[in-house]
Amino acid sequence: MAKKGDMLYAWTNDSALAKKAECGGAVTELLKYALESKTVDAVLAVTRGFDLYDAVPVLVTNPKDLDACAGSLHCGTLLLSKLVMEYVPKMAGKKLGMVVKGCDMMGMLELAKRKLVNLDDIVMVGVNCGGSVSPVAARRMIKEKFGVDPDKVVKEEIDKGQFIIEFEGGHKGISMDELEDAGYGRRSNCRRCKVKVPRQADLACGNWGVIGDKAGKATFVEVCSDKGAKLLDGAVKAKKLTTEPANPKGIETRAKVENAMFKLGDKWRKRDFEALRSNLWETIAKETGRCMKCGACIAHCPVCVERKDKYDQPVLMVRPGFIPADPMFHLRRFAHISDSCINCGQCEECCPCEIPLALFSHAIRTEADKWYEPKLGKSAYSN
Amino acid sequence: MARRLQVSLSFGSGAATNPFEDVLNSDLIVMWGSNAVEAHPLAGRRIMQAKKKGIPIIVLDPRFSTSARLADEWIRFTPSTHIALANSIMYWIIKEGLQNTAFINERTKGFDDLKKTVEKYADCQEIHGVPLETVKRFARTYARAKNAVIIYCLGITELTTGTDNVRSMGNLALLTGNVGRPGVGVNPLRGQNNVQGACDMGAYPNVYSGYQACSVPENRAKMEKAWGMPVGSLPDWYGSTLTEQINEAGNPIKAMYFMGLNPVVSYPDSNHVKRQLDKLDFCVMQDIFWNESCDYADVVLPGTCFAEKDGTFTSGERRINRVRKAVDGPGESKLDWEIIALIAKKMGLKGFDWKNANDVWDDMRACTPNMFGCTYEKLGKPESVHWPCPTVEHPGTPILHIGKFSAADGKGTMFGLEYRPPAEVADAEYPFTMMTGRLIFHYHTRTQTDRAAQLHYEVPESYVQMNTIDAKQMGIKEGDKVKITSRRGETITKARISDDVAPKVMYMAMHFKDGVNNLTNTALDPLSKMPELKHAAVKVEKVA
Ligand SMILES: Cc1cc2nc3c(=O)[nH]c(=O)nc-3n(C[C@H](O)[C@H](O)[C@H](O)COP(=O)(O)OP(=O)(O)OC[C@H]3O[C@@H](n4cnc5c(N)ncnc54)[C@H](O)[C@@H]3O)c2cc1C
């Protein structure tokens, strides 16, 4: 019987799925089992759209359809939590399984904090995430740095500090450091991220730490909750999945890689945040001075939920119809998310005016987290 | 649909010369009569990226527009004096020997004509309002920039001098050799999404798809064959442009079929448009919403919106972008091509047996040489294809005029052009100049955007921008109701007071019903037939 804290190697018993899956296919198999056993009514996963660079979220109810979601799309810069929030009213009484990267998981926890979702109704199968690359940037990088036609690439992965592509006629890897120093590579919020293993999900799955004859053929699973343990046991019992205790050397390797990623995250934080140190106000003013008020940073933010009566509020500092936006348009958002920005990067990714919004709000949150405790929620009065 | 003709006179072909993204390769971005940041947010995004990269941006506009706010320099000039200002600039470029003589000799003609004309414009601040020193400084900056790009838009074209205004932009680029390589060029921004596509499909009174002239017998013969029509049945004459069609409604035009157009709001002189539509025997409107013009229709056909259909949108950079269906259209709506095919079949016409959007596209491709190579498969890629693309193997043409212009002799033409005032200028009775434009928060006549709560909240109603001094003289305060009248009609709106417009100049956005188009002028540019939407004489009074 699995229990919270267990570290396992797991792989699917379905050889066809094993071929499609990223490593051991455990994630897909677990989600399929969750559907088959009626643990959940639907699964929210990610599938390949038009091409390798096009990640599309899908809601699956037929377990067979999950096979099409197997495999990791590193150019998928999606955030699933807000999507869940929008569909919560339709989910009433239903249970949902979902695959979550660190940011997806943090988004869900923030929604739960705000009572916008009930985590009892949700099973989160986590995938480790070393970061994602924006699709347009990825295509440019493959063309310019790898010298390969991006349409000829059949698989991309991030492994051992390299971005690796397989294409018709070969494969090629370039170190992330080299790519990122040259302005390519992962999104800047991903570079600063330190939630590489989503331990607040029910299970955290990845490829780090799978060594020996299982390398590339098994999924490393860390059991993070009783719910996760139960799902895993069920899948094993139903003969869908095989597990074995993780190789202790593998566990060590995984910890080492995770640590190396923390260091890298710290390096980027230092670089990005220190650059803002002495001219923070001016930089924010200059960058947000391009804002056309499209509202994408709010619509995609996992911790921004607008009031229903917002348009009936008296206008003092953000005049309707005026652009570039009055400064309070941004300040009130930074203030609102200051204790809960998860640095998912959606605000920046979706900004048509190229404003580095995640950089600002991530800096505010991390600096404030280091200084103030405890954090408080909504007050009983309003003033 | 008229602007293409305008650049075509200078370069022999009339679309954007370079892709939008190419502004990032530039050393100087000149925006003239374009408020792209608001009116063309996607092209505007490239301007934002350029700004972030530190590429200098100069905006020439009578109004302190949003684009002007973001620019490094804003040069205010008197409305509709583009030719005089461009001529002054070129006078100083030539005077200081900053023209690109090698380029002029090798690739252009008409320099002497130009040189002679601009001599009269050494200093004409009394026309264009720009101080001489500013003109000289701009001339030097533009001529000395290694790669300079001009982006222009309706502020240049929607005037009775539109064609010559555009040719003036062409003159500037040719004089300084800023054509035919990355980071340079003369780029028009189109009036709306897919105007380029509509033009490319032959939505003109004188060309078939891909700008194949109706006047050429071989083209007519080819189309007659493709469409199964009797030999000699296609007309060879220049038909009517939309503005002329509205004038001809009732006589000789008896029936009109509008698709995705709301002329009662978007066309100049709304009262005239309404009177004309009333004269039709039969009027069909095909739209995704019931718009103001539907009140004049005998039949309204429900089409589908971008998210409900497959197809293509071609951007001003000649890039054919695929649009993919995400959801079914509501109620009885039908795909637009399906509606056309159904009507064609009822009329007993052949050749409309398409199964999907791809069939329609291939049907067009088969008789359109400059797009023959643009297969749906190639369009599927994110980068897609820029026409001309004559064969399936052809990679497409993101930058036009490399090495050679598309005119018959391969040369670009510079024209000596004289300044002409607009058709209607301010006078004692109508002492103000009214300009028009757009807001980022609304698209065209708001049939779509006003249904979005956020956009309605931002700008729920029309307003007029007027100068502080004028407002003070007339005792008008911010938010006051004012009545604005021209020779053609009147509108009531709210005043917004600032120095964003010069004294005696006013500005209104074109999106609102019974708004500024009650005032605008239908006078046409003689060549492009573009109406003078950007300049009208008006008077203003405070409403109690
Ligand atoms: C962007 C990204 C970065 C990763 N980086 C690391 C890493 O640095 N170290 C590490 O150990 N593991 C990383 N992983 C996890 C690893 O690639 C595998 O997903 C994991 O080992 C599970 O393998 P599997 O064979 O069981 O998964 P599969 O059975 O193949 O299932 C993969 C699941 O991931 C989902 N998915 C694919 N792309 C995305 C996406 N962009 N966003 C959200 N869900 C997605 C699919 O819908 C599917 O359900 C990363 C995954 C992703 C998506």
Image (cartoon, rainbow, N blue to C red):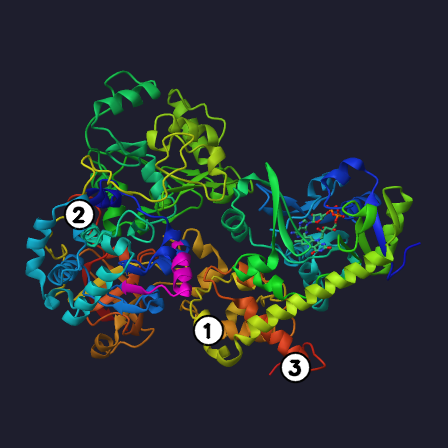
Q: Which of B386 and B202 is in front in this view?
A: B386
Visible residue check, residue A102: yes
Q: Quick check: marks 1 and 3 in contact, CB under 8 Å?
A: no
Secondary structure under the numbered disc 1 in the rendered image: loop
Residue B26: where, in percent of width, then height?
34, 57
- Tell me if mark 3 has few (under 14), some (14-19) or many (20+) residues whose alpha carbon lies within 10 angstroms of its own: few
Disc 3 secondary structure class: loop
Q: Nearer the viewer, mark 3 or mark 2?
A: 2
Picture quadrant where residue B201 is located: top left
Residue A137, given in percent of the width and then of the height, sits at 52, 53
How far apart in space, not on screen, are marks 2 and 1 (Cα)? 41 Å
Is residue A297 positioned above or below A172 on the image?
Answer: below
Amino acid at pointer 2? Asp
Across the whole image, how many numbered discs are drawn on residues?
Answer: 3
Q: Name the residue under label 2.
A: B525
Query: On the rendered structure, is A280 left or right of B524?
Result: right
The residue under label 3 is A381
- Sequence order check: which comes first, mark 1 or mark 3? 1
Please provide the residue range marked out in magenta: B43-59
| Gap between marks 3 and 2 measured at Cα | 64 Å
What residue is shown with label 1?
A318
**Residue shown at 69% from the left, 55% from the top:** A160
Q: Is residue B413 visible?
A: no
Query: Residue A204 appears in which quarter of the rendering?
Result: bottom right
